[in-house]
Amino acid sequence: MPRQLPAAVANFAGRKDELKALDGLLGDVTRGGAATVLISAIGGTAGVGKTALAVHWAHKVAERFPDGQLYVHLRGFGPTDPVTPAAALRGFMDALQVPAGQLPGGFEGQQGLYRSLLADRKVLIVLDNARDADQVRPLLPGSPGCMVVVSSRSELAGLVAAEGAHPISLEVFTDAEALELLARRIGAARLAAEPGVAKELMGLCARLPLALAITAARASARPGFALATLAAELRDARSRLDVLTTGEQATDVRTVLSWSYHGLKAPAARMFRLLGLHPGPDITAPPLPALPLSPLARRAGFYANSPAATCSPNPRPAATPCTTCSAPTLPSKPTQRKASPTGALPFTGCSTTTCTPPTPPAARCTRPAT
């Protein structure tokens, strides 16, 4: 009987509504009310806690799946190539103790054997960090007694439409959730000793769970330091991501966010960079046509087939509009970088709390003067 879940998440905080939603789906499985395998697709931006939620809940309900729990990190977004469905399936077959000599030769045959083995069993399957629905589909069982939890930065709309997956979208923490995480990891007494600092830390981390966890870890490692000192280190937006690092790729905020950027299609990536011209924290749809986009970028759109991404407020020098077409222009000329053959500027890393695209050349008005 496989028990493949990673270690339980220490000091898990928040996500009460999402845990309740998962519990509701589990009730359908255990009561036998599900006609097909139930799938929950947990989506959200990088560092928002998708894996933490999936693993925490899986441990919480593991005993409800007496035939075992299967887990695979699909590496859909990261520094290495994604795990192929064939490789993931072979790992599951090993976990189910299928001798190599009894494996069918073809991939479709192995899929059939996998589903046969899970028929009439109650198994929880966690597919973590999926790239897209095509990576997930071959790993879905056919038994209604099984449940699948998928985490991904992509929306997996195809999985929702075709396989009836139940989407759960994670946002950054609420103030209460962020405070709960800090209190659990730093200590409520230490937070209470410096009133107001906790709220500032939450804001400087944009309530992003990964950033908050790193901040709490740094505070715990330096128990003699005042939290105000830690907040002061985070105030400079240009060096904030240098502070929010752990020395390893999987928990480095800048690196983790960059994987989402590199997953964008070229038109969406260019739009993302151009949004850096906007001086404020939010932008609505009407100003977008003023950005110097190519016709291809306008047709392709910014939101189509792109992994979830979040930009936090980033104070910038005030922009001055072009007097002819109102396109925003930066007050000073940025450093020029060599463009790629597609016209896209290379990504050089983030410089704010969550993610800020590299600053592109200042917008130039292309409308003929009248």
Image: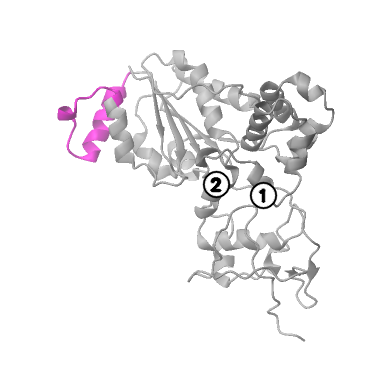
Q: Nearer the viewer, residue 226 or 173?
A: 226
Please tell me whether mark 2 sits on a helix, a strand or a loop.
helix
> Which residue ends up furthest to the front in the rendered image?
224
> Which residue ends up furthest to the bottom in the rendered image?
370
Q: Does the magenta segment cover residue 110? A: yes
**Residue at image point 24% right, 39% down:** 108
Q: Does the magenta segment cover residue 76? A: no
**Residue at image point 66% right, 32% down:** 218
The residue wearing badge 2 is 255
Which amino acid lies under the numbered mark 2 shown in the image of this protein?
Thr
The span shown in magenta is 95-120
The residue wearing badge 1 is 311
- For residue 69, the mark is none
Query: Which of pointers 2 and 1 lies earlier in the amino acid sequence?
Result: 2
Please, which colouring scheme is shown? one colour
Which x, y percent locates residue 261?
55, 53
Q: Residue 112, can we see it?
A: yes
Q: Residue 25, can we see it?
A: no
Q: Main secondary structure of the magenta part?
A: helix
Where is 190 relative to 205, above or below?
A: above
Which x, y percent locates residue 163?
43, 37
Q: Quadrant of the image for the C terminus?
A: bottom right
Q: Nearer the viewer, residue 243 or 174?
A: 243
**Residue at image point 22% right, 24% down:** 98
Which x, y percent locates residue 40?
50, 31
Which x, y percent locates residue 291?
68, 68
